[in-house]
Amino acid sequence: MAVKENILAHKGVWVFAEQREGNLLNVGLELLGEGRKIADKLGVELTAVLLGHRIEALAGRLIKYGADRVIYAEHELLATYTTDAYTGVICELINERKPEIMLLGATSTGRDLAPRISARIHTGLTADCTKLDLDLENRRLIQTLPTFGDNLMATIITPNHRPQMATVRPGVMERAPYDEKREGIIEKIKPELSQEHIRARVVKTIKGGKAQVKLEEAKIIVSGGRGVKGPEGFKLIKELAEKLGGVVGASRAAVDEGWIDKAHLVGQTGKTVRPDLYIACGISGAIQHLAGMKESKCIVAINKDKNAPIFKIADYGIVGDLYEIIPALISELDNTKNN
């Protein structure tokens, strides 16, 4: 009975709206879209939780993206993510406000933050979800994630503890629509924080020399697999991607061979994407790769093997040598541009 009463005391859906250097991450906006659906079914408020310093303008954008309320925790010690500060602030809010569901992106930050929160408030956590649903009668979040090499889908619930927590892969949910006319409540709080609360201190941030590959945000992706045959082949992939205004992706096989950096990896162990156009070049279509790109709006497959599994999900298939087909595509794009 005590467990049941404790569950009933929790109401509302929360989304952690992750920001970096004053910019909202797409995954937070995707979770607002999914959170909006869940909150509407439950008949509760959708709240975005935003932590940072001097980023109040972002709070207004979160309302426009579907939040009913934004709790904005403002403090100079929240400007840069630290586990102790963010965990402490969010746990205090959860204990005080008692949300029913909390969603976070499965980013490097989310994967560090979510388990710390769940352990401290003694609730369950399902990590790296690709689908969320709702058992409305019991107000249970149905959390689904692939397992055993994506051959099985595991469905997980949290029956006895609240909030129900999940991290969700970037790119698997549709981004919430932006509504300029939408209004909501922005609640700014000033948490009591001092350097003593933070065991690890960020002294300096060093950005990598390589440009970040934003596969989850790309509208067009041209990916290469084992059929590219080597690193030189990715120069051709890159040229086509640049002609189309897209970015370069890759399969696990190409990354494992060392032909391209892991930052370009699409699939179960890489990025999950849903671009408007996905061109798979020399990719057979292993289930691990399909898990990361099957939601693309239009899939074009180029492969010499007419029986390659990639053709089963492709909207358009070209059977042939990519070293003949891609140059022909580039030539045609050049001709179209010149005309």
Image (cartoon, rainbow, N blue to C red):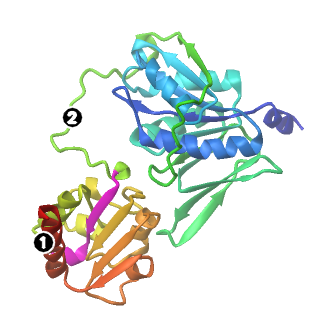
Residue receiving disc 2: 207
Instruction: Report the amino acid beneath label 2.
Output: Lys
**Is the residue 32 above or below the residue 287 in the image?**
above
Residue 112 horizontal/vertical position (percent) = 45, 38
Residue pictured at 26% horizontal, 56% vertical: 246
Q: Total of numbered circles in the picture?
A: 2
Q: Kindly report which numbered mark, 1 or 2, lies closer to the viewer in this rendering.
A: 1
SS label for mark 1: helix
SS label for mark 2: loop
Span shown in magenta: 218-229
Q: Examine the rendering and report whether any part of residue 259 can be seen.
A: no
Residue pictured at 44% horizontal, 52% vertical: 171
Labelled disc at residue 331: 1
Q: Is residue 320 left or right of residue 185?
A: left
Residue pictured at 33% horizontal, 90% vertical: 306
Is residue 37 magenta-colored? no
Task: Please report whichever mark, 1 or 2, sits nearer to the chain's N-terminal start.
Answer: 2
| Residue 124 location, quadrant | top right
**Is the residue 195 above or below the residue 180 in the image?**
above
